[in-house]
Image: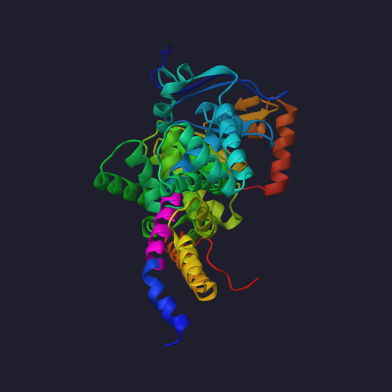
Amino acid sequence: MQKDKNLVLRVEDIHKSYGTEKILKGISFEIKKGETKVIIGPSGSGKSTLLRCINQLTIPDKGRVWLEDEEVTHDKKDINRFRQKMGMVFQDFNLFDHLTALKNVKIGLLKVKKMNKKEAKERAMEELKRVGLEKQANLYPAQLSGGQKQRVSIARALAMDPKVMLFDEPTSALDPELIGEVLEVIKKLALSGMTMVVVTHEMGFARSVANEVIFIEGGKIIDQGTPYKIFTNPDHERTRQFLRKITELYGKSEE
Amino acid sequence: MNENLALIYQSLPYLLKGCTITIGLVGGALGLGFVIGIPMAVGQVYGSKYVSGLISLYVWFFRGLPVLVLLFLFYFGLFSLLGLNLSAFTSAILVLGLRSAAYQSQIFRGSIQSLGEGQMLAARSLGMKKSEAILYIILPQALRISIPGWSNEYAILLKDSAITYAIGVMEILTRANFIATRTYKPMPIFLTCAVIFIILTYGGVKILDLLENKVRIPGYGERRSEI
């Protein structure tokens, strides 16, 4: 289906309604290997639904998704294979509460990848180290701070060797002083060449990390372009308004 | 020696034998209820409309009738109608177990539904099948939460087991009644019977308390002294 070998993810004309309410009205974008796309937009604009339509946690009414040269939306039975390759990080972490940090990272390796125990443990420790939490390996989620929980959840997703990482407002549920440590981890990940789609309100992060910023409102892409373009000279007045409001709210963050 | 005490002393081995029958009955019924109750709870939460409707019907039936009516209905009615030649003991395990399944399924269902939706989402996002997510993520958490409710079910079932007296299961009460009618001394015998039941109830609840503490997830649900 695709010619461009560097294409990791392609989303084509995604529609989704709940009842009579149309959440997504035809969203398409592509993302190349190593790119970071940041999706911004007011709440209720369908950003989270869009991410969930990508890994089919929500089944879109219409539209297709490709991961590399395979169609994700092609066959429902195959979806578990694709989901492994699309790491997802949730706003409220969703760590498995009955498992230690280490076991949270390990469980996908053991039960989905069917790795043996020793290998899985080593790999999980490696990922915890990558997010700076090897010392917390044996603590349970309830014993971790919000920032630590989110870093464990990032490690859990990374352990599966995803082709693309989907971040759904990864810092929105965090205390302000804990946001930095999580953004730091995500930034490092971007620099290491991970392909990522990030839904966020952190404009400083968008500015410094994104290859492209997509502004969504009312289930449609209103504006998209480089951070420079979006933040200085967006095509639409609405984008400018939104950014002004966000900046008022969060203050002008790091450049 | 006081003659009442002598009577209790003499009857004790006979009553304790009934005690093992009661324990077998309650253990069997709880076990059967557990084995059926778990898939019922899972089916009710994650199953199709029809599956969950069917389970609701089952629960409605077994919760809607007095246990004695169920016992008579199955032991004298259904089981003989089906040509099953079951002993009173086996019948009692089946009836109490099927009934307990209805109650246990609702304990487990409540626990499953009290977990956030995010647990399932996170599990599925890792590529787990729904069944794997239920087995490895949902049930281990839901079962922990269920222990207090389950402990209640144990206590209720234990006491309900005495009603199998009515179909002649040789449990504690049936035996106590035998002795009482033979000796015309109901008081000491039924008191002994009561003490045995109290010990069994609190012993079992205590064991489940210990289990609850043992499997508690660190940082969660620790007992609070304030408020």
Q: Position of residue A177 (x, y in %)?
A: 57, 57
Residue at the (51%, 76%) spot, across then down: B188
Q: Position of residue B206 (x, y in %)?
A: 47, 67
Asked where in the image residue B156 lies, by quadrant, the reply is bottom right
Q: Foreground residue, B52 or A242?
A: B52
Asked where in the image residue A236 lies, by quadrant, the reply is top right
Q: Position of residue A173 (x, y in %)?
A: 60, 49
Image mark count: 0
Residue at the (32%, 41%) spot, across then down: A110
| Residue A91 seen in the current view | no
Q: Foreground residue, A154 or A216?
A: A154
Q: Foreground residue, B122 or B45?
A: B45
Quick check: B113 left or right of A188?
Answer: right
Residue B25 falls inside the magenta stretch: yes
Residue at the (38%, 75%) spot, across then down: B10
Q: Most extreme residue toward the bottom, as rendered?
A: B1
Q: How is the image coloured?
A: rainbow
Residue at the (42%, 27%) spot, across then down: A82
Q: Which residues are magenta?
A: B15-30
The N terminus of chain A sits in image quarter? top left
| Residue A103 seen in the current view | yes
Residue A115 falls inside the magenta stretch: no
Residue A241 sits above or below residue A222 on the image: below
Q: Position of residue A35 (x, y in %)?
A: 46, 30
Asked where in the image residue B5 lies, by quadrant, the reply is bottom left
Q: Main secondary structure of the magenta part?
A: helix
The C terminus of chain A sits in image quarter? top right
Q: Foreground residue, B53 or B11?
A: B11
